[in-house]
């Protein structure tokens, strides 16, 4: 039976420690569900938020993009904070930030307040995601135990991307838009309290390590500006002064960050981590995943509401089928990764996902019914779940315990950038033929533009398959033992007794 790297309570048996880890995993899965829900939960509520707070449709997207921008900008800092300040401490602080910012969002009386609340929520997400991942990757030993834990955590997260639309629809329809914010207050608050009882204490600090403040400031500002430019480019125009200026400043700041990291003795992001091929490939796959699979819920929501006229509740209910398919896929991903290795699992997942996503095209027609979407939603969802679990297994393999936070911050940053770039590019493509159209002509043009986007995301998944080939081929029966090329874990992960 495995035990935590932190000491168990006096007199605890290995069975007791195992049960404690079970409760810990349940809490980490809940935290990931909260994080994933907030990516999509406001989509279906945007029209009501705009109508109630009095800001026009073209600026309502700021409620979504404020979260994406600040989550993307602070992820590396969140990962390093988990390594240096303690994983449990960072986890608890992140949940409290979520609870307080959600309360502010639900009480917002104007557009500025709700956008600011979403920005703070994004910072909470940037602290929460790498802290949660690093807890899993240090409490569960590399191999089948960690694979299983990542599958449970991944099932909550991948399903949350679509359950967010369901819950957002139910809450908005029955209780109004503030409910999509208020729901986080008890969830995050209770999770923060439970963490004090079920997550092992942070170990005593060893040698004091300096926090790389110049690196943190430059990468946070640069990443935030980069994501902001990508998010606002389609709205303001790619040649507009604010967007061009943001890109230029982002490039300068990220260049400064690279120079700082090359010279500091204790960098925020040690570049030597990229010698671990499994982390590098895993990071690339998280980017591709979110730029392809991750943008589909947005375009499905637009199809259902803007083209077919579904209500918020109907749109939410339509996401039940893909949610179940994704959850099933995460479990298949864990079993496959343990049995045949991460590389083969990712290849299988991308093939299934590409086939299913291409099949979705049949339902992206102005006159098509929901039934035509179902086969594609099921197959694509299974592929999505398989890739989600396997890509985090790849990203965590071969990194030492004391650097799991920053490694997961790197992979999470790639995830967020993939979302921002994918939405920016595919939204621009989808809108090409909609200018000047109204009524049925607009509905048809919107569906046609999204049909092209669906086919392009399926092609992008093939690109993910090609990237996966860079992972080292595993020996038959070796499972994940030969996935990584780089430094093996240093023994601070869980030990098998």
Image: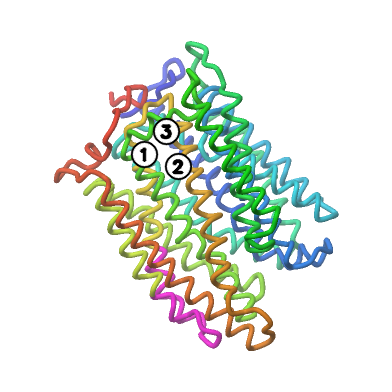
Disc number for residue 357: none
Q: Sequence order check: which comes first, mark 2 or mark 3?
A: 3
Q: Earlier in the sequence, mark 1 or mark 2?
A: 1
Please name the residue shown 58% across and 82% down the image.
Answer: 445
| Residue that numbered label 2 is attached to | 411
The disc at residue 279 is: 1
Residue 374 lies in the magenta stretch:
yes
Query: Which region shows up in magenta?
Result: 359-381
Residue 138 higher or lower than 161, as above or below: above
Specify whether 382 is left or right of 75: left
Q: CA distance from mark 3 to mark 1?
A: 30 Å
Position of 23 compared to 282: left or right? right
Residue 474 among those drawn in magenta: no
Circles 2 and 3 in contact, beta carbons < 8 Å: no
- Label 3: which residue? 19
Compared with 368, 382 (above or below) is above
Which residue is found at the position 41% from the left and 29% from the top?
138
* Residue 472 in the image, given as x and y percentages of width and height: 23, 43
Which quadrant of the figure contains the N terminus?
Answer: top left
Seen in the picture, residue 174 relative to 450 is either above or below; the reply is above
Nearer-N-terminus badge (3/1): 3
Residue 172 at what x, y percent from top left?
71, 64
Left or right placement of residue 287 versus residue 243 in this view: left
């Amino acid at each position: 039976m495995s035990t935590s790297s932190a000491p168990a309570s006096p007199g605890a048996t290995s069975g007791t420690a195992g049960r404690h880890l079970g409760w810990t995993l349940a809490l980490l899965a809940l935290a990931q569900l909260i994080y994933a829900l907030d990516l999509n939960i406001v989509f279906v509520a945007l029209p009501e938020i705009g109508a109630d707070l009095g800001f026009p449709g073209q600026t309502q997207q700021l409620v979504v993009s404020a979260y994406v921008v600040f989550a993307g900008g602070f992820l590396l800092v969140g990962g390093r904070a988990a390594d240096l300040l303690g994983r449990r401490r960072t986890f608890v602080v992140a949940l409290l930030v979520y609870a307080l910012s959600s309360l502010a969002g639900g009480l917002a009386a104007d557009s500025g307040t709700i956008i600011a609340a979403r920005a703070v929520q994004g910072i909470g997400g940037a602290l929460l995601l790498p802290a949660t991942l690093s807890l899993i990757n240090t409490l569960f030993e590399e191999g089948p135990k960690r694979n299983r834990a990542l599958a449970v955590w991944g099932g909550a997260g991948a399903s949350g991307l679509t359950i967010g639309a369901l819950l957002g629809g139910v809450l908005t329809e029955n209780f109004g838009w503030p409910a999509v914010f208020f729901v986080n207050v008890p969830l995050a608050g209770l999770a923060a309290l439970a963490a004090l009882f079920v997550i092992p204490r942070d170990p005593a600090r060893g040698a004091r390590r300096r926090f790389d403040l110049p690196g943190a400031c430059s990468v946070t500002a640069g990443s935030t500006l980069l994501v902001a430019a990508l998010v606002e480019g389609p709205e303001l125009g790619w040649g507009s002064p604010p967007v061009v200026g943001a890109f230029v400043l982002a490039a300068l700041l990220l260049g400064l960050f690279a120079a700082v990291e090359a010279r500091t003795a204790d960098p925020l992001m040690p570049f030597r981590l990229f010698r671990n091929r499994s982390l590098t490939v895993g990071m690339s796959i998280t980017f591709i995943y979110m730029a392809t699979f991750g943008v589909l819920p947005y375009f499905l929501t637009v199809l259902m509401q803007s083209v077919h006229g579904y209500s918020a509740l109907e749109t939410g209910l339509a996401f039940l089928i893909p949610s179940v398919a994704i959850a099933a896929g995460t479990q298949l991903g864990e079993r496959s990764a343990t049995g045949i290795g991460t590389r083969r699992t990712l290849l299988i997942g991308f093939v299934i996902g590409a086939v299913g996503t291409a099949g979705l095209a049949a339902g992206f027609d102005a006159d098509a019914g929901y039934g035509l979407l179902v086969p594609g939603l099921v197959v694509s969802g299974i592929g999505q779940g398989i890739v989600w679990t396997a890509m985090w297994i790849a990203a965590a393999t071969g990194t030492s315990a004391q650097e799991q936070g920053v490694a997961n911050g790197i992979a999470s940053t790639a995830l967020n950038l993939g979302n921002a770039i994918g939405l920016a590019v595919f939204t621009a493509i989808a809108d090409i033929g909609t200018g000047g159209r109204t009524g049925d002509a607009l509905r048809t043009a919107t569906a046609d533009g999204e049909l092209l986007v669906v086919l392009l995301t399926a092609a992008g998944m093939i690109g993910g398959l090609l990237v996966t080939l860079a992972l080292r081929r595993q020996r038959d029966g070796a499972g994940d033992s030969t996935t990584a090329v780089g430094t093996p874990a240093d023994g601070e992960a869980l030990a098998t007794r």
